[in-house]
Amino acid sequence: MKESKIGKVYLVGAGPGDPGLLTLRGKELLSKAQVIIYDRLASPRIMEFANPKAEKIYVGKRVGKHVANQHEINELIVKKATEGNMVVRLKGGDPFIFGRGGEEAQILSRHNIPFEIVPGVTSAIAVPAYAGIPLTHRSYTASVAFITGHRRFDQSEAPVDWEGLAKGVGTLVFLMGMTNLPNITSNLIKFGRSPDTPVAVIRWGTTPLQESITGTLSDIAQKVKEANFKPPAIIVVGDVCKVRDDINWFEKNPLLGKKVLVTRTRQQASELVKLLERKGAGCIECPTIEVKQVEDLSIIDKAISQLDNFDWIIFSSPNAVKFFFLRIDQLGKDIRILGRAKIAVVGASTEKALKKHHINVDIVPEDFRAEGLLDAFSKIDLSDAKVLIPRAVVAREILPKGLSEMGAEVLVAPCYETVPPEVAPQTLELLEEEDIDVVTFTSSSTVKNFFKTIPENIIKKIISKAKIACIGPVTAKTAEKMGLKCDIMPKMSTIPSLVEAIEEDF
């Protein structure tokens, strides 16, 4: 009997949270992995680099709630590897810095499963740096210690040299120590550290959700309690915390501390997220729509075969551009097939999408809505003109109806459809824990599917506190029909304008 081929496991450090701090090796492996087993502290944004066909298994752990315990995780890694898979075990920070990577590697070794260790940027170093705290500074200290903070320090199973730490090390960095913060501070004071020693607690470090509390050993525990500061957080003890006043660079962004829920598709959220994060906003991506090619391609195929007959082709969204040209490519054709047709678009983002195909646009209305395009066409004689509108299966009928009334012969050709996607467990956990400041909607579909994809109790929590930002009046009207009040709307229906409007509101 032929034995099945054993796979290989890669223990990959995901870094501290900022996806830009993932190593190139880690990114490469994610793109090839057949199975990805990932932690809570591995940034959801990093999963964008994952092989879309990979089996993704969430094994997140937090205080009081484990999706899987360590023994179950070990068994899972071994099982997936022995099935012949290329497995990426994605761990927050660095696998060998309080990440149980050593234990998992030992298990793999005992089962004769090949493995590779891919170090990551540990939060112990990166988070203080993003908070403006150098762990060493020649004016303050030349020594650093990293200590796990989640163990029960009063138990014999977790001996800690408190006197050595209190008196012999300049900077102390505690990871996973939030629940034990009172024990940590009291023990350090008990064994000789001054109660006036500066302390900083940094939550969700290196991400736009980062926030910090500073104090001393004598008062930091009370400050953290009053602020309802929750994990994950890093605790830094030492005089180096004094330097934060001078070099606190990351937390000076204008929207820092504002948490924004982005409901766009995964593929289209990047521009909005990047612009918001440059302003310091903490973005939680929760795609409420997934865009895919229609199953019935007969209408769009017929239209493409007769493109020479059309006077105008009208695109109302970047998705219409994407799926129209996708089908052209699938049929083995290229842009030469467009022939004599002129091109009109609803907005600047759609024009930008066409320019990627080296196509210039003939009409872009000042009002980035169907109404604006109809106004532009009202100045043109459309009698007997043939117009093609590639679009979504479900869309507003105002454009084809208005053009028909002007005398045009209009063909609506569905080339894509929107469906509600499955929300990642990590995202639901964040929405349960975080207070959202703004929810962004960039289309009517994102509004409608927001209510379909998010559990009702989480929706009630979000909208009780968050402002609603809509990209334009059509989306705002849909939001109002669903019982939401639009608080923020830009003058122009573009992503940059939406970000500017959010910044101005705050």
Image (cartoon, rainbow, N blue to C red):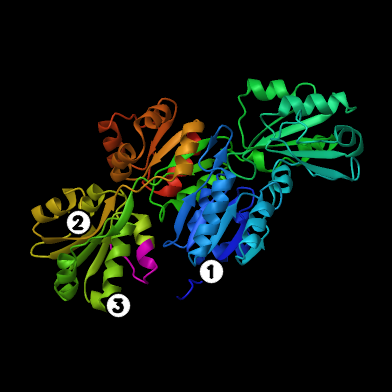
Residue drawn at 29 percent across, 64 percent down: 323
Amino acid type at mark 2:
Phe
Is label 2 or label 1 in front? 1
Amino acid type at mark 3:
Asp
Task: Say whether marks 1 and 3 touch (CB < 8 Å).
Answer: no
Label 1, on which residue? 6
Element under disc 1: loop
Dominant SS of magenta comes to: loop
Using residue 8 as the reference point, say whether residue 134 is left or right of it. right
Nearest to the observer: residue 253 or residue 436: 436
Label 3, on which residue? 334
Q: Could you tell me residue 126's position as x and y percent?
A: 70, 48
The answer to if 60 sits in the magenta stretch is: no
Is label 1 or label 3 in front? 1
Element under disc 3: loop
Disc on res. 377:
2
**Is 494 above or below relative to 181?**
below
Q: Which residues are magenta?
A: 353-364
**Is 504 above or below relative to 43?**
above
Q: Could you tell me residue 4's position as x and y percent?
A: 48, 71
Disc on res. 140:
none
